[in-house]
């Protein structure tokens, strides 16, 4: 009964506007298609943002793992002691001696700066990354660009990236628990 009343009202409305039911059905179909298209576009944009954020997170993760490996390779004993050792993001105006001392892992083993090149190596002689050890006692290179915490946004991970070489360095303190 409700359906019949609704159909009668639709017919009267369409006839009152001087158009056919087919034209009204076409208008409704177009309106629904446009609405669906806008919803799909919004979903696609949300997925793109999710993928961008995942890629940034994976980039930071890879950098942090590389920093841990650089710290491991920068110590004479490979990071000794009864505890796990830690890697801290290096503050550009502070020394790693000071930064490590502010934690329970108060002994500094190294201040490493690392960077890598995107993509797979094309040969065994191609430069795929660079490193530097500034030592623990000085701030070393104080450029804010090397400070991953002070970076303006996550995009800083990829800003100025030169796929050939000499892209952005990031610095880390290699700290251990006192023996």
Image: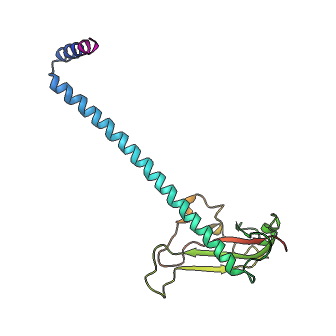
- Residue at point 44%, 85% (across, down): 123
| Rendering coords of residue 26 (x, y %) | 19, 30
Side of 56 where 44 appears, left or right:
left
Residue 3 in magenta stretch: yes
Q: Quadrant of residue 89?
A: bottom right
Q: Nearer the viewer, residue 32 or 161?
A: 32
Q: Quadrant of residue 78?
A: bottom right
| Above-or-below relation of 107 to 24 | below
Query: Where does the N terminus fall, quadrant-wise?
Result: top left
- Residue at point 24%, 34% (across, down): 30
Number of numbered markers: 0
Side of 34 where 122 appears, left or right:
right
| Rendering coords of residue 164 (x, y %) | 47, 78
| Rendering coords of residue 53 (x, y %) | 51, 55
| Above-or-below relation of 132 to 83 | below
- Residue at point 61%, 75% (across, down): 114
Q: Nearer the viewer, residue 167 or 32?
A: 32
- Residue at point 16%, 22% (across, down): 21
Residue 151 in magenta stretch: no
| Above-or-below relation of 73 to 58 | below
| Rendering coords of residue 122 (x, y %) | 43, 82
Q: Main secondary structure of the magenta part?
A: helix
Query: Where does the C terminus fall, quadrant-wise?
Result: bottom right
**Which residue sits furthest bottom?**
125
Color theme of the render: rainbow
**Which residue sits furthest front?**
82
Q: Which residues are magenta?
A: 1-6
């Amino acid at each position: 009964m409700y359906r019949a009343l609704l159909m009668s009202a639709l017919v009267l409305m369409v006839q009152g506007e001087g158009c056919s039911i087919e034209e009204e059905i076409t208008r409704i179909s177009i309106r629904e298609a446009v609405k669906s298209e806008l919803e799909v576009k919004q979903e696609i944009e949300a997925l793109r943002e999710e993928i961008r954020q995942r890629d940034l997170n994976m980039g930071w993760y890879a950098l942090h793992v590389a920093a841990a490996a650089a710290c491991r390779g920068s110590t004479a004993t490979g990071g000794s002691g009864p505890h796990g050792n830690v890697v801290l993001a290096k503050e550009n105006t502070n020394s790693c001696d000071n930064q490590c001392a502010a934690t329970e892992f108060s002994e500094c083993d190294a201040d490493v700066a690392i960077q890598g090149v995107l993509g797979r190596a094309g040969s065994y002689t191609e430069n795929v990354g660079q490193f530097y050890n500034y030592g623990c006692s000085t701030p070393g290179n104080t450029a804010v660009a090397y400070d991953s915490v002070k970076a303006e946004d996550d995009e800083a991970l990829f800003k100025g990236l030169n796929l050939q070489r000499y892209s952005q360095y990031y610095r880390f303190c290699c700290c251990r628990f006192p023996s």
